[in-house]
Image (cartoon, rainbow, N blue to C red):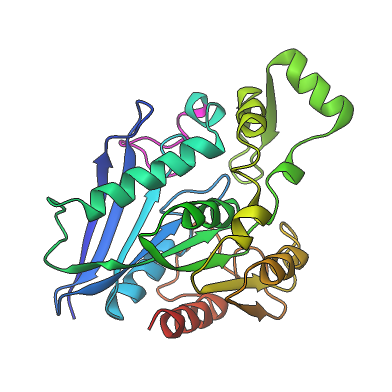
Amino acid sequence: MVIIKQKNIPLPGKHGRPVITDVFFSEEGENKPVLIFCHGYKGFKDWGAWNLMGEEFARRGFLFIKFNFAFNGGTLEEPIDFPDLDAFGENTYTKELDDLEVLLDWLTSEDSPYSEVADVTNIGLMGHSRGGGVVLVRAAEDRRIKKLITLAAVSDFGDRFPKGKELDAWEQKGIAYIENTRTKQQMPHLFEFYEDFKRNEERLTISRAAKELHIPVLIIHGSADPTVSIQDAHDLHDWIADSQLFVLEGSDHVFEASHPWNQTHLSDALGRIVDRVTGFLE
């Protein structure tokens, strides 16, 4: 089976930066269900085993799409890692929701390049970590999304922000930094990130969006996730009427993958996830 991989397609974003997109699908068949994947915080579309995951979903008959959020810190020339920290600092949750809308509009437009191979009435959305929260909010707003999968998703954006004196210091300086433990970069956040959240807090309240979902949702989480508590998955499961919870016992935040991922196969946990997601979408 030949897998077609179209990499680094620049879609014009709403805020002056492109949404850089990859599309994977097999040459065989048509009317393929669509699966769109969103990376998480300090993530990117080519992290770790995401390319292998995309190839596997393509082999199973899906049109698989992944992309970099426009302000994730990557560029068209260097979509891996974070060569543009200024852009990273300017990112917000609402920009990420706009990026996802750009991609959905492109895919479902009359002149979509995939109208011959994809069934755009059958779109599934999958997000990892912070991206899991983003896809959940988007799915509550967008009837084009028919099924939703979250991987190690956060259940509360507001809870991730600093509090008290730390928040005051961020406001006074206008910028704060967090170290990327892998690249050793000091990753900036403008205070506008928090202000944008507060201006749009109702929209960005994941519990509200979750309770408004009327589509099937598969919630996947590792029981030993040190980054996002397994409690977040239980919260989502409680809030979403039509949801399944799949807990991988002993698995971590990235399901035993890492970056770079030099193996030719998925981790056992990601293999199990691909199996479960395939069954859920079919």
In the image, residue 228 above or below residue 94: below
User: Which residue is drawn at the image coordinates 65% and 63% (left, top)?
Assistant: 253
The foreground one among 221 and 232 is: 232
Where residue 81 appears, as percent x and y from the top left, is: 47, 42
Q: Is residue 11 left or right of residue 2?
A: right
Where residue 15 appears, as percent x and y from the top left, is: 38, 27
Quadrant housing residue 163: top right
Residue furthest to the right in view is 165
Is 189 magenta? The answer is no
Is 81 magenta? The answer is yes
Q: Quadrant of the C terminus?
A: bottom left
In the image, residue 139 above or below residue 241: above
Residue 72 visible: no
Magenta stretch: helix, strand or loop mostly: loop
Residue furthest to the top in view is 172
- State which region is magenta: 73-85
Where residue 44 appears, as percent x and y from the top left, is: 46, 48
Where residue 73 appears, as percent x and y from the top left, is: 47, 35
Q: Is residue 120 left or right of residue 166?
A: left
The foreground one among 253 and 168 is: 168
User: Which residue is drawn at the image coordinates 52% and 28% (left, top)?
Assistant: 85
